[in-house]
Image (spheres, rainbow, N blue to C red):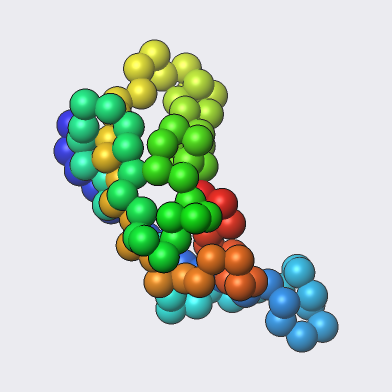
Amino acid sequence: MNGFTIKIPATSANLGPGFDSIGIALSKRVILNCQPANKWGFTIPEKDQAYIPSDTTNLVYKTALYTANLYEVATLPPYHVTLTNEVPVARGLGALQQL
């Protein structure tokens, strides 16, 4: 198992007359550094700990598990995910809404 990094741009979908149908990716990002581990876990920046769980209730874990089940992957290898968050939580920039 190798480590990998996922970069997720913040978005804004309230652009003029397009309302929620026209959006744009912004330069702020959420970065997930994923390293093989013995069990799933998350390191969350202190400023975000009230909003983002560091256990298997985290949306990243739930999404990985859902995807593994969807594609009939028998075993989901565990990772430790270190989150770097440039996006203010719950401020209308849709990258992190209860990860």
| Residue 81 percent coordinates (x, y) | 30, 45
Residue at (82, 83) in percent of width and height: 17
Residue 40 quadrant: top left
Answer above or below: position of 16 versus 2.
Answer: below
**Left-right relation of 86 to 2:** right
**Left-right relation of 43 to 93:** left
Residue at (50, 77) in percent of width and height: 26
| Residue 16 percent coordinates (x, y) | 77, 85
| Residue 72 percent coordinates (x, y) | 47, 17
Picture mark count: 0
| Residue 57 percent coordinates (x, y) | 50, 35
Q: Which of the image's four quarters has the N terminus?
A: top left
Answer above or below: position of 44 versus 94.
Answer: above
Answer above or below: position of 68 versus 48.
Answer: above
Residue at (35, 17) in percent of width and height: 75
Residue at (21, 26) in percent of width and height: 38
Q: Nearer the viewer, residue 34 or 91?
A: 91
**Left-right relation of 16 to 51:** right
Q: Nearer the viewer, residue 38 or 18?
A: 38
- In the picture as drawn, the residue positioned furthest to the top comes out as 74
Q: Is residue 7 visible?
A: yes
- In the picture as drawn, the residue positioned furthest to the right comes out as 17
- In the picture as drawn, the residue positioned furthest to the bottom comes out as 16
Q: Is residue 6 visible?
A: no
